[in-house]
Image: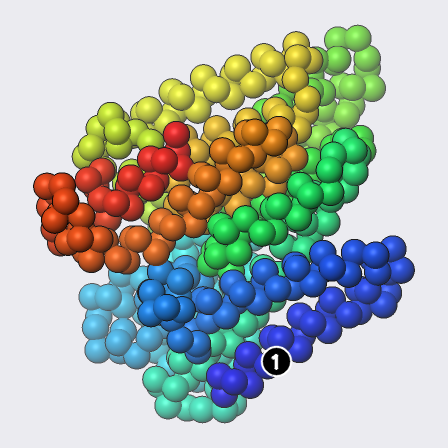
Amino acid sequence: MTESLTLFVLFLTLLAVVLLLHSFRSLRSQAGVLIVLYTVFMISFLFHAPFTQSPLGLWGFKYNDVVYGVFSPRFSTDLMNNKEKLVRYWLRPESFEELVSGTNLCPVPYVDYKFEYPPLVGFFWFLTTCVSFSISGRLTTAGDQFFSMSSSVNYVLQSLILFSFLALCFHYIKKINSLHRLGAWRTALFLILPSTILYVTYNWDIIASGLAVTSLYYFMRKNYRVSGFLLGLSVASKILTGGLLIPLAAYLLRDVVRDKQVVKNLTHYIISFLVGGLTPFILVYIASAEGFHAFINHHASWYCENCVYALLVPDIFSPLHKYFYVVTGLALLSLIAIQTLRNSRSLVSLAYASVGAVVALNYVFTPQMILMISPLAVLALNKRELGTYVIADIANFSLIITFFEDSTLRSLISKIIPIETGFNPWTIDSPTQWLATIRNI
């Protein structure tokens, strides 16, 4: 079964690349780049696939949120005999029983069980889990086999969605790159960054990134309704890309007094953004207020994860980290808005600064979140700055690997310098947090 799934994904993605080359003559000259795109995806896919071995025996290469962070805790036979764990994840425990019995193979995130990701991700998740359970239900009835097969099928389907958004992101990086007549190497750099390769099928950040970059392109082409709607959808995938709204809205606002058409453009842009961004959240709230509140509470109660403020306040559970984020985030976004109104910097640079500030200064900066920054970084930074960024990206790439090897690394380092041994990758004395600090600074 596992070999068949691997071959199936290889065939589908390769077929997609071949069809693109066949359908669009203009893409034939880009065959090499498309092959790199395909290769990057397949490396990431095989690294994280639940049906392959861990590369080099390192669990950090294998772990991903799609399988081990979201699917496994909610869909497992362990929950059948563990009511405490069942009610921790399921809002309607009877829906899990119906799933196991086969009477309802399409439980709904936010409604039947808790789901900590924004609505657009939840929508894709509902589709792929429903298909996965339906396929697995036809092939097996045994509990362990049912969930194991469903996990693998769901990962394949999710990966294909993520591949499509990687392709979307790359395509519009290339188009923005052409508008500004930048070097073609910049678009290729995004693909070969270590973090892009490792994290593209790790989580859903590439969806938000792809939509945000596409939104920026349509904004530059003065299609403000499409741009606003796409940025709204990006926020409905990962909220932090909403930082892009500040320079884009300010860009339109600066001419609003002199030109009545600009007023219409700004109005259309904001309304489209709200439709794309708020509607999915409203629908979730209508479907299940309890599930919506669980989503909010999950993020509100999170701790300082790889955040820069740990240098100031080592206690990762301190509420001060959130206050620091609000103050620094608002200050930088205000400065970016002022810079935009003064027309003193390029729009791409301001877009990079806004998203970079919102993501990098967040009290949660997990390694996959760098995918929201990288597409704008390769467009905005000069060669010297990009060299520094690559170093930060390499440090970021290493975070998930050192996270799971924290105990081993501490034991080795303790022979040289006095540090506590054991497993604790969250505290500032951990090698993982040393890498996070290098990345953050």
Q: Is any part of residue 101 visible from this angle?
A: no
| Local SS, label 1 | helix
Q: Can you say which quadrant of the picture contains the C terminus?
A: top left
Q: Tell me the crowding category of disc 1: few under 14, some 14 to 19, or many 20 or more residues within 10 angstroms, Cα based.
A: few
Q: Position of residue 55 (x, y in %)?
A: 40, 69
Q: Position of residue 359 (x, y in %)?
A: 46, 35
* Residue linked to disc 1: 8
Residue 289 sits above or below residue 440 on the image = below
Residue at 71% x, 30% y is: 269
Residue at 10% x, 41% y is: 418
Residue at 46% x, 67% y is: 47
In the picture provided, is 90 more to the left or to the right than 215?
left
Q: Amino acid at mark 1?
A: Phe
Q: Quadrant of residue 80?
A: bottom left
Asked whether 17 or 271 is in front, the reply is 17
Q: Is any part of residue 93 visible from this angle?
A: yes
Q: Position of residue 39 (x, y in %)?
A: 61, 64
